[in-house]
Amino acid sequence: MPASLIIAIIFAVVSGLVALEIISLTGRADKLVYACDVNMSLCEPDELVTLTFRVRNASLLPVMYAGFSVLFDDAIEVRESDEWLAKHIQGGLFGNMFSFDFFLLPHRTFKGSIRFSVKERGLHRIGRVYIERGDFMGFKSRVRSFDISKQMICTARPCEDEPEIKALGGFLGDISVRRFICEDPSLVLGFREYTGSEPLKSISWTQTAKTGALMVKKHDFTVDTDVAVVMDIKFTERPVAERCLSLLRTVCDALESARIPYAVFSNGDIFEIEKGSGRTHNFAVQRRIGLSRFVKYSSLPDLVSHVASTGGSKRGCIVITPKLEPETSACIAMLDASSGVPTFVLTGELPKPEAPEKEGEAA
């Protein structure tokens, strides 16, 4: 091969590399546009959540090197395979980052996903993303960073199967039975939309045909027996307060399973949630549980007076309180008198560890 041809080939290759380097240096970093989303906004502790992301090259020039990295907050735990982690994890000064490197043609999009879970109850930031645009030769790069705008609300864990939780089943069974025993079909006060919790025999097919939506008969209030869940928020130890929220979550789950309408009352930042049942109602309750910071706004007697004044004579009440005190007992007696139904009480007191046996002591 002639020497002149070899020189021409080398010159062409070098010129091409220089041209690619110049192109990669002239590209603007803000032409890499990203978007992030999560498949849910409310989760349970350790529930699998998926973060999806898209990085788009909005320029007319190719991006020779692009990088997308995520630095998660401490409450987030990545739940990917060991092989995936070995490929994408990068140790850094502030913790482990999860990175993706790629090449992007003009107006093309790179897509990816990361599965994670939230460790504990509360409102959590997901983390921060870093978008890197580098030159062809790897001499220079520009990095921009953004906070992920999405936030996760994590509700409380359900309580484990304990004796007092088991006793709740009998209470709810009695409430469920009374909903149908007290029914008086001769006293129809009106009609309302079917929520899914009423028996099929309550459906008024005449009104359904007129309105085009399922309608049920609205009988005397003794038929519509419901439950009031009273949440007493007090300044107490964090584990006890967290257990109270877990009890609230467990009670509401049990009511939903039994299809019993319920309202939630609180003297703190759980606030008041009107009577209802179903997916939307339960979502609102679990969201309040996740957002609670144990802020108290009024006393328990004031709360109980409000509950007693708004309830019917057959409404069952479930009180959740950190511990039983003389004031609490008096409030429970007031609820018993107003509803005519014994109040069910759950406390957040943690069981005391058993004292170790001394040597020589009989088993």
Image (cartoon, rainbow, N blue to C red):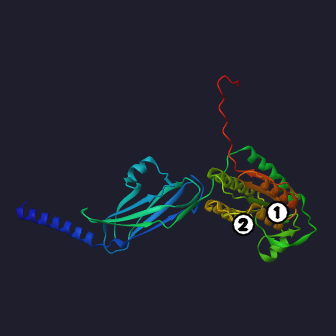
Vertically, is 16 above or below 88? below
Q: Is residue 131 left or right of residue 156?
A: left
Q: Residue beneath label 1, please? A: 200
Residue 65 rendering spot, x and y as whole percentages: 31, 63
The outermost residue toward the top is 360
- Residue 261 in which image quadrant: bottom right
Q: Residue beneath label 2, please? A: 272
Identified by mark 2, the residue type is Glu
* Disc 1 residue crowd, few under 14, some 14–19, many 20+, Cα 10 Å: few
Q: Which of marks 1 and 2 is in front?
A: 2
- Residue 277 in which image quadrant: bottom right
* Disc 2 residue crowd, few under 14, some 14–19, many 20+, Cα 10 Å: some
The one nearer the camera, 12 or 230, is 230
Identified by mark 1, the residue type is Leu
- Residue 130 in which image quadrant: bottom left
Vertically, is 92 above or below 362? below
Would you say residue 278 is visible in this rendering?
Answer: yes
Residue 351 rendering spot, x and y as whole percentages: 69, 43
Q: What element carries label 2?
A: loop
Q: Is mark 1 on a helix, strand or loop?
A: helix
Asked if the residues shown at circle 1 and circle 2 are in contact, with their CB atoms under 8 angstroms apart, the answer is no
Considering the image in quadrants, where does the N terminus appear?
bottom left
The outermost residue toward the left is 3
The one nearer the camera, 360 or 284, is 360
Residue 14 rendering spot, x and y as whole percentages: 16, 65
